[in-house]
């Protein structure tokens, strides 16, 4: 009798697992709202202006999809706006193409410029906000690392400027 009772309890419990209440189901159409009231899309967005790496990419060259022409245009001298600060940059996701810097130094996505004093290079990038204190670190794209000639395994200190 105990075995039959235990089997029925297990069967009833497992049957209930298939039915989640609506408030527990994921809703892809809803964005997360931060404490400061800004809405943040919790899913990564593909950048339409950059090519994605090949499916089986393994090497740095295969992940770096920014063309030599695009890098040359990004490193061309240009007027910079205000200095936003200095940050230590780590390598961001190599599968996210383009020239970008995810940093807590900005509150909205905007064009900007990153300067790496060790190599003397600078590059125009898209500045993408991330949460954290302004003294927190940043994440930089593989293509930006390559263009600045910064060591991929290091944590380079870069100076960040707005574009205007």
Image (tube, rainbow, N blue to C red):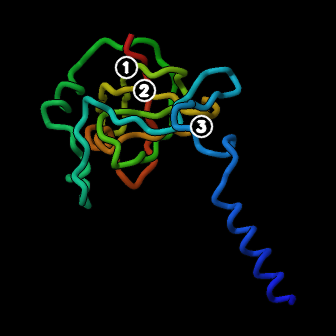
112 in relation to 131, above or below: above
Residue 1 x, y percent position in the rendering:
86, 90
Residue 120 x, y percent position in the rendering:
30, 33
Label located before the other in sequence (2 or 3)? 2
Picture quadrant of residue 35: top right
Given contact means CB atoms under 8 Å apart, are the residues at marks 2 and 1 in contact?
A: yes
Mark 2 vs mark 1, CA separation in Å: 6 Å
Q: Is residue 76 left or right of residue 4?
A: left
Q: Is residue 118 left or right of residue 86?
A: left
Mark 3 vs mark 1, CA separation in Å: 20 Å
Near mark 2 (Cα within 10 A), the count class, few <14, some 14-19 or many ≥20, is many
Position of the C terminus, as image quadrant, is: top left
- Name the residue carrying label 1: 111
Near mark 1 (Cα within 10 A), the count class, few <14, some 14-19 or many ≥20, is some
- Name the residue carrying label 2: 127
Q: Tally the numbered discs.
A: 3
Q: Nearer the viewer, residue 7 or 76?
A: 7
Label located before the other in sequence (3 or 1)? 1
């Amino acid at each position: 009798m105990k075995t039959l009772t235990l089997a029925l309890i297990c069967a009833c419990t497992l049957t209930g697992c298939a039915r989640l209440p609506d408030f527990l189901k994921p809703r892809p159409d809803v964005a997360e709202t931060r404490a400061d009231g800004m809405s943040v899309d919790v899913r990564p967005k593909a950048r339409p202006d950059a090519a994605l790496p090949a499916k089986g990419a393994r090497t740095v060259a295969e992940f770096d999809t920014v063309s030599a022409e695009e890098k040359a245009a990004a490193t061309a001298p240009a007027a910079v706006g205000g200095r936003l600060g200095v940050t230590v940059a780590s390598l961001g996701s190599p599968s996210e193409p383009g020239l970008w810097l995810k940093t807590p130094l900005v509150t909205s996505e905007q064009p900007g410029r990153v300067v790496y004093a060790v190599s003397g290079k600078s590059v125009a990038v898209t500045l993408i906000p991330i949460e954290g204190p302004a003294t927190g670190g940043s994440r930089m794209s593989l293509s930006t690392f390559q263009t600045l000639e910064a060591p991929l395994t290091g944590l380079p200190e870069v100076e960040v400027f707005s574009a205007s």
